[in-house]
Amino acid sequence: MDITVREKNGAAVQKAIDEVAAAGGGRVSLEPGVYPCATIWLRSNVELRIPGGSKLLGSANPDDYDDFLDPRLDAVAPEGSRKCLLACRDAENVAVTGDGEIDGQGPLFYDRNVPPGAFFAKPPRPRTRMVQFFRCRNVRFEGVTFRDSPGWTFWLVACEDVRVHRIRIDGCQQMINNDGIDIDSCRRVSVSDSFFRTGDDCLILRAIRRSPEEPSVCENVVVSNCVLDSRCQAVRVGCPSDDTIRHCRFSNLVCRSRNGIFFENPVRYLRMNCTGYLAASDISFEHVDLSCDDFPVRINVEDGICLRALERIDFRDIRFHSGRPVFICGNAGTMLRDIVLSNVSGTVEDPVPAEFRCVDRLRLRDFDVSAGADEVRPLVRTPSQSWETKF
């Protein structure tokens, strides 16, 4: 069943989606124009098509949006928000396609009375996410521009067989916490031929634990042929209290960001009563061009944190220019294992080109990195009894 929506509001879009789902599935297409809306719930076997010239325009009032409530998810509410624009749970064969646009009007949610270029101040109230899918299968996003999400643009949770192709995420870079795609505890996800511009991280792999009885595994994620432009991190992998992230591959990326590839495990991100739990393994990065203000690659485990594993991580055919060094450091309680840097070259403005610590089986092959000049410091003589000072 196919329905074309002509009435320009979110209620008409929702009505069409519900009718198509009740009929067994089909496509809902929008006519060109602007459709003011709040939360829209997607259903199984329904494709929402947003063609060029059409736009879903999210409300600037957070009270207009539904709370995404589910007892299996209620323990977790990133940024304190349960609001979202496109919502879907326990569904299959769902698609959002077309060359049109979804606009979340993100800057209107912030205090913008800040110095030019500074991050907008966070408001006291939680901000809306743009896309939240939970426990969905066979999902496709293709062609659409996702503009100015007030919070995370995508939060995909416990989904399987997701294809993201040829989309554009374009967020004002004065907004914080407007991540691109958070892939959380998902299996078999592909992201390809897409563009990301965000104030926060562009692509994030997570395995957020929702209950002690339910393992959270993020695996078999493939990202290729993407441009990542971030005021924070281009790619972030895990947080110290996450569960398991494994078998993921990133290739053919162009990144312009504060930090490039980030495995950061600080104490400030630990959950209550946790000293670390993450196990991340078999993750590769190939054919990546990085231009970073700070670290091009940073794997870090702060002192006192004990992770289950950070191992078998490969960096191959990487080119970079950065302000700070390649930084790969575990700690006494978390040895990094089987780290490979092959055909890695670049320049670092910092006088230290690379720093490695607490790494078991570090392999460097064609590692060609140049450091910047250090500050010239004056000679300071001190009294000495050495015979060398006598002539």
Image (cartoon, grey):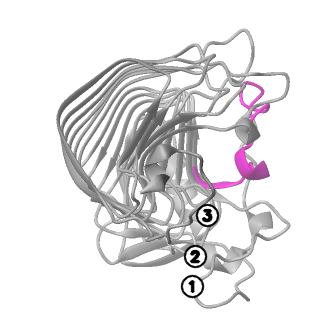
Q: Nearer the viewer, mark 1 or mark 3?
A: 1
Report which quarter residue 298 is drawn in.
top left
Q: Residues within 10 Å of mark 2 (few under 14, many from 20)?
A: many
Magenta part, dominant SS: loop
Question: Residue 12, percent across and down?
Answer: 55, 64
Please tell me whether mark 3 sits on a helix, a strand or a loop.
helix
Distance of mark 2 from mark 3, alpha carbons? 31 Å
Q: Are marks 1 and 2 in contact (CB under 8 Å)?
A: yes
Element type at mark 1: loop
197 vs 79, left or right, is left
Among numbered discs 2 and 3, the one appearing first in the sequence: 3
Using the image as rendered, state which of residue 285 and residue 370 is in the foreground: 370
* Residue 381 percent coordinates (x, y): 56, 63
The residue identified by callout 1 is 117
Vertical arrangement, residue 345 with respect to residue 382, above or below: above
Residue under pointer 2: 174
Write the start and end of the magenta stretch as one range. 70-86
